[in-house]
Amino acid sequence: MMRRLYSGILLATLFNVTSAHAETLDRIVAIVEDDVILESQLQNEAATILQRIKASNTLVPPDYILHKQILEKMVIEKLQRQLAEKSGIDMTDDMLNNAAADIAQRNNMTPLQFREELKKQGIDYQSFLDNLRNEIVINQLRGREIGSRIKVTDREIEHFLETEGGVSENVKYRLGHILVAVAEGASAEVIQKAGSKAENIVKSLREGGDFSQLAMGQSDSGEALTGGDLGWRSRDEIPTLFVDELGNMKQGSIVGPIRSPSGFHIIKMLDIKGGPGKHIVTKTQVRHILIKTNELIDDDEAKKRLLALKARIADGDDFAALARAHSDDKGSAINGGSLDWVTPGALVPEFEKTMNELAVNEISAPVQSQFGWHLIQVLGRKQQDNSDEFKKEQIKETLRKRKIEEETELWLRRLRDEAYVEIFTERL
């Protein structure tokens, strides 16, 4: 009742003004908990996504379907941002700018060149940063809400080895995915209706229907606006629900509907590439000193302390002794700051990026991550062929990713079902 009262007050505030002035105000297309999505925001997002669809040479769906899918995507994102804010998850401007610089570097551009390239493509740089911040914060939220609860047992690893024989990253599959969602606790009638809808979609596909178009118009999954394309994935990165179907699929094969707690799934094998081969990993021996920020130590003070420690090391002081005395990472401080030998992906991106750029024995400038400010030193590097230990770690990460993807789908559906959302369809 209170939310509906809020809705009425909000609308009255925005629209019950003089008619001449009302024409210039933005219109609300959705209320999401205690926030709103405006028509201008929807139009801006639609313009960006429309440009992406056209660039991929995909037939653009009708406006009412496109806007419906985009609005649903915006609702889900807003709910996650609201939850992140309540949970105290955010990122500093320095961390955001570092993330943007990293993207530019991966595209072989300087930050300035990257900004110019975005401008050529009609993308406002501030909008790009806002979207990047949104993506990073949501990923951190999902890590806290879902990733921290996912566990993989030794027995699951053994079962994987027995049934699937280990990881095969050099074989890649490109799957298309359509989901007809079913809410938790749905009635038998609702489930039957969703199942019939999924059967009709499969029938349309087998009769030559365009998968991308049907995904955009009919799918409830997060990939709907990309035509249901899950991208290139190894067998180990594909959701468990679909893995058993791979052996019977070739390019163009369609499978489904496949029932899961989140609804009915339809998959299509869009393409397959690659073959077996060795996996070589570079391990890095690294140590660090961490200074955390708090009410008494801000970012500038943390950097100042680390620079002072770096100067002492340059003058001959022992890194390990200083780490034991000053590092706020008590787990590694007792070992002189040592994190031992680490594999790619084991550390947070900001730390790992700097670590990878250091020469052996070189000490970094102060580097910020979500944990605080670090002084990093690389002690050694080595390449290692695919060992049993490495294989098990890869399998563990594979199983973890599968579980996270499956749990994320359920979590997002639950978040949406339990939220107060009011959509004004007549304004789409």
Image: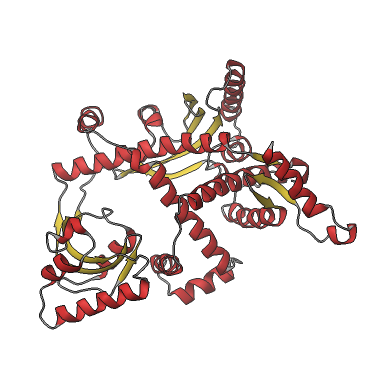
In the displayed structure, 277 sits above or below 199; it is below
Looking at the picture, the colour scheme in use is secondary structure
**284 lies left or right of 250:** left
The residue at the far right in this view is 19
Task: Residue 253: give x, y in percent of width and height.
Answer: 46, 31
One can see residue 324 in this view? yes
Residue 120: image quadrant is bottom right
**347 lies left or right of 193:** left
The residue at the far top in this view is 188
Identify the image quadrant of the N terminus. Answer: top right
User: Closer to the camera, 319 or 361?
Assistant: 319
Task: Residue 380: give x, y in percent of width and height.
Answer: 13, 65
**408 lies left or right of 130:** left
Residue shown at the point (16%, 80%) measured from the top left: 312
User: Closer to the camera, 112 or 153?
Assistant: 153
Residue shown at the point (36%, 71%) measured from the top left: 299
Residue shown at the point (55%, 48%) measured from the top left: 77
Task: Residue 201: give x, y in percent of width and height.
Answer: 59, 28
Residue 331: image quadrant is bottom left
One can see residue 269 in this view? no
Residue shown at the point (61%, 43%) measured from the top left: 72
Task: Residue 22: give x, y in percent of width and height.
Answer: 84, 58
In the displayed structure, 143 sits above or below 344; it is above
In the displayed structure, 13 sits above or below 169; it is below
In the displayed structure, 108 sits above or below 153; it is below
